[in-house]
Amino acid sequence: MTDFPEFLTSEEAKKVDAALLVSKDKFMARLAIYALRSLQQISRETGKPIESISPEEVALWIQQDDRLEPQIDLDANFTQFFSNLVVSAQKPLAQTAAETQTPMADLTVEQVITWFENKAKS
């Protein structure tokens, strides 16, 4: 396994904080960015497209990363909760990919934030 990704870098967090979004949408943007990073890593490790990664595969990925155990109590409830969060972010990521005509695996932080800003305006 490769390094477990950070939730957000400080630069990414500053970009989300500067976005014209209410707190709830900023949270959702942060979640989508982190989910994208996690899904990209799972995709690289499994060779599967991001769009087809299941909650079970996310859970397996979490359970196999022994670096998480010292940082997070990895019980079954957390693993299921975390897996569902990551997979639920696939919907806004898919919408961002469709609107920007960019493969989901190639989305940028800026594209995700812009999608949330545009969604908030509509």
Image: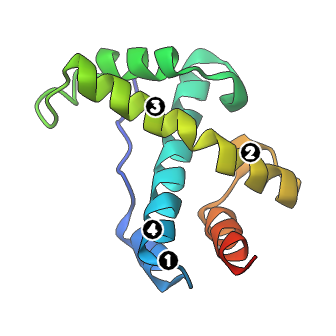
SS at circle 3: helix
Q: CA distance from mark 2 to mark 1?
A: 21 Å
- Which residue is the site of mark 1? 15
State the quadrant of the N terminus: top left
- Which residue is the site of mark 4? 24
Image point 43% across, 79% down: which residue? 17
- Which residue is the site of mark 2? 94
Q: Is residue 61 left or right of residue 109?
A: left
SS at circle 4: helix
Image position, residue 112 (x, y; %): 64, 62
User: Label 3 sits on what residue type?
Assistant: Asn
Callout 3–callout 1 Cβ contact below 8 Å: no
Q: CA distance from mark 4 to mark 1?
A: 15 Å
Return the residue nearer the eye: 42 or 72: 72
Q: Which of the marked residues, 3 or 1, is nearer the chain's N terminus? A: 1
Q: Is residue 40 above or below residue 9?
A: above
Image position, residue 68 (x, y; %): 22, 30
Image point 47% across, 70% down: which residue? 26
Q: Which of the marked residues, 3 or 4, is nearer the chain's N terminus? A: 4
- Which residue is the site of mark 3? 84
Q: Which quarter of the figure has residue 44?
A: top right
Image position, residue 28 (x, y; %): 49, 59
Q: CA distance from mark 3 to mark 1?
A: 25 Å
Q: Which of the marked residues, 2 or 1, is nearer the chain's N terminus? A: 1
The label nearer to you, 4 versus 1, is 4
Callout 4–callout 1 Cβ contact below 8 Å: no
Image point 61% across, 23% down: which residue? 53
State the quadrant of the C terminus: bottom right
